[in-house]
Image (cartoon, rainbow, N blue to C red):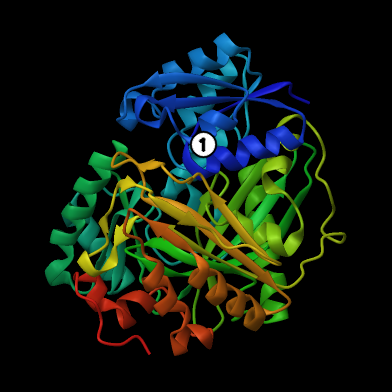
Amino acid sequence: MFNKVLVANRGEIAVRVIRALREMGIRSVAVYSEADRESLHVMLADEAVCIGPAPSAESYLNMEAILSAAVATGAQAIHPGYGFLSENARFAGLCKLCGITWIGPSAEVIERMGDKSEARSTMKKAGVPVIPGTAEALHDAASALKAARKIGFPVMIKASAGGGGKGMRRADSPAVFEEMFRAAQAEAASGFGDDSMYLERCVQHPKHVEVQILADRFGNVVHVGERDCSVQRRHQKVLEESPCAALTDAQRARIGKMAVRAAKAAGYENAGTIEFLLEPSGRFYFMEMNTRIQVEHPVTEQVSGIDLIKEQIRIAAGEKLCCTQRELQLRGHAIECRINAERPELGFLPSPGKVSGLHLPGGNGVRVDTHLYQGYTVSPHYDSMLLKLIVHGKDREEALAKLRSALGETVIEGVHTNIDFLYEIINHKAFAAGRTDTDFIPRYFARYQKGRRPKDAE
């Protein structure tokens, strides 16, 4: 087992990893930008190293600075969290060259699964259901239009190196296709440095269902249930829950089996997520693989009792999985919502500033993952997420009741938040009935998207 691990991230996920390391008796090293000098993760870590000024490109994405910090402090491993360098194959490879263990899959697997076209091809060969689409990367609008006509409209245009909804557009007809393709391609080139694209048939009104997997270096792979991540705004998840209420036991067994098959086909090691689109008919298709821990991992932890961060660390240290598929038991229902510093009534405009007052909920079945404290200044330089509120109950109805209570108890003063918006979502009739899909927010909360508060949210 490691003696010291560097956490190459910030915010709540850095705090989460540092706490796990402390519980395991492992010393932690935090890295921070000049803007994060007073951040909670810096205070909690055993050691902390400043790696540059506020802009991410000069700090949290500065591979040389992070590796130098690891070498200087004698860290044996690096945990990347999510975002930033967590899915950067080059950084994972550089860690190996420096003799530092990367807490995640190999650089080769990250690269293979990060290329969405290659990932689709890998899954197709393994017999995992894949959305009908193009097999090869596309680079020009004219060739892409020909392929789109064969697939049939509407189609989704996606960046091969994409993720997080960037470099993605929906084209409903040939008339708008080339414009949508060029816009998505420009976004992909800017965001990922890669303008190669691919097309998929647009799955109508799907649920976004993802399966958590764990794999060790001895060939053992298990799935730790599924999460319903259908409530999204501009392809960004807002609320997640486990299990997915729409799946039957037979569907749940099949989607879990396919996730394990996908992980084995990828030669995967460590924690990862296989993402699927679930049609109203019950058919599901592989969408992509996330080669890191997810923001929404706590809901899986709550229903499984497995600490996924600790398991990541143990796997990277060469240990076997904590349990077999047969031993793994899932209990109850968990829901997570993301509380952000933003103004939904103004089109979700970010709201940085100083937190002048703070009260967080607690009690049986209530968990808060956050880096906030009273007096903390929310920086305009980074993601606006303030905290994750997670609840766990014996069933969905109890979990939802706990979430309503916990949200009503949450007080964050000094910055604007999306708490009222989240409260409207969970009190919507369609959400309460489990009738959500990826169009849920655009359908029922369209005026928020345009910067105007809806008259009612049922």
Query: Residue 285, position in %: x, y?
Result: 52, 68
Q: Nearer the viewer, residue 184 or 14?
A: 14
| 171 vs 44: above or below | below
* Residue under the point 52% across and 85% down: 432
Query: Residue 225, position in %: x, y?
Result: 69, 64
Q: Is residue 304 left or right of residue 404?
A: right
| Placement of the C terminus among the 4 image quadrants | bottom left
Q: Write down the residue under mark 1.
A: 40
* Residue under the point 82% across and 39% down: 320
Helix or strand or loop: what does disc 1 sit on?
A: helix
Residue 277 visible? no
Amino acid type of the residue tagged 1 in the rendering: Leu
Query: Residue 252, position in %: x, y?
Result: 68, 73
Q: Nearer the viewer, residue 13 or 442?
A: 13
Q: Nearer the viewer, residue 433 or 358?
A: 358
Query: Residue 336, position in %: x, y?
Result: 55, 64
